Image (cartoon, rainbow, N blue to C red):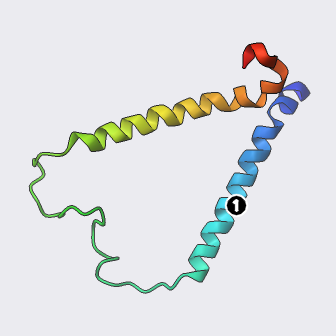
Amino acid sequence: MKLIFTEYAFILIFLGLATFLSFIIFLLSYLLTPQKADQEKISAYECGFNPFDDARSTFDIRFYLVAILFLIFDLEISFLFPWSLSLRNIGSFGF
């Protein structure tokens, strides 16, 4: 059990630090920004599309392609993270 913890200690520390910093940044942004509600902020959508159009209108395929590419490359990074931590152990052959 101790061996598993020592191998993943850096990842656990990284995740803990990232979680802590995200909460701190969220709290600071909530406390420091003015909380004025105007018509644009309380509208249903802020993406640039009129929310009252026909639901069956054509939608540009590029939005779907960008989302799929983001998911693919995001998952690749999650597989590369443990490899990058063990890079010094595998030497130049593994690199």
Give the quadrant of the C terminus: top right
Against 38, is 5 above or below?
Answer: above
Give the quadrant of the N terminus: top right
Against 65, is 17 above or below?
Answer: below
Against 21, is 64 above or below?
Answer: above
Residue 84 quadrant: top right
Residue designated by label 1: 21
Residue 66 quadrant: top left
What x and y, as percent, mark residue 35? 48, 84
Residue drawn at x 60%, y 82% is: 32
Q: Is residue 94 left or right of residue 44?
A: right
Residue drawn at x 74%, y 50% is: 16
Between 92 and 38, the one nearer to me in the picture:
92
Against 24, is 13 above or below?
Answer: above
Q: Residues within 10 Å of mark 1 (few under 14, many from 20)?
A: few
What x and y, as percent, mark residue 47? 29, 62
Residue drawn at x 87%, y 32% is: 6
Residue drawn at x 78%, y 17% is: 92
Between 72 and 91, the one nearer to me in the picture:
91
Q: Is residue 89 left or right of residue 74?
A: right
What x and y, as percent, mark residue 82? 71, 29
Residue at the limit of the structure toward the front, as seen here: 92
Q: Secondary structure at mark 1?
A: helix
Residue 85 quadrant: top right
Q: How many numbered circles are shown?
A: 1
Residue at the limit of the structure toward the top, as seen here: 93
Residue at the limit of the structure toward the right, as seen here: 2
Tag 1: amino acid: Leu
What x and y, as percent, mark residue 8? 79, 33
